[in-house]
Amino acid sequence: MTITLAATVAFAAPARAVEAPFEPGLMRLAEVLGSLHFLRNLCGEKGTQWRGEMEKLLQAENPSAERRARFIASFNRGYRSFDGTYTACTPSATEAISRYMKEGEALSRDIASRFGN
């Protein structure tokens, strides 16, 4: 009975494409861009630079509709993670900006060096 049930569950689930090894890094990069978009504007940078960087990422990846939705959800998650926390620029927000800038740079460099053409 257990074997039959396991086989039924395995066959009932739709097959998913194997995720590329760089996919988690790209999704994290999208989240970092969303965080920077919120934090940098909170701390005085007016504009859409970080949203623009997200658009460049989407253009470069040319993702399927489902994958595009995941990129956008990651960006929005990053934005919202600080939206509810900060209402003014604080030393903590400035430190978060610094950390996210470093993380975004490291992610970009790592993905490009390991998986770039």
Image (cartoon, rainbow, N blue to C red):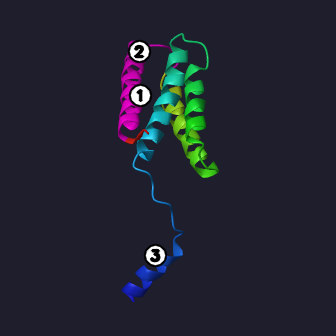
Q: Which residue appears at 45% of the width and 59% of the height? A: 18
Compared to residue 1, the image places residue 22 above or below, namely above
Which callout, 3 or 1, points at the residue further toward the start of the chain?
Answer: 3
Residue located beneath label 3 in the image: 10
| Mark with earlier residue (2, 1) | 2
The residue lying toward the viewer, choosing from 64 and 38, is 64
| 10 Å crowding of disc 3: few (<14), some (14-19), many (20+) | few
Q: Which residues are magenta?
A: 87-114
Mark nearest the camera among 3 and 1 is 1
- Residue 94 is marked as 2
Which residue lies at the image location 55% right of the left edge and 46% below the top edge? Answer: 70
Mark 2, secondary structure of its residue: helix
Whole-angstrom CA distance, mark 2 to mark 1, is 15 Å
Report x, y in % for residue 81.
Answer: 48, 32
Name the spot of residue 110 as percent of width and height, x first.
35, 34
Give the mark nearer the N terminus: 3 vs 2.
3
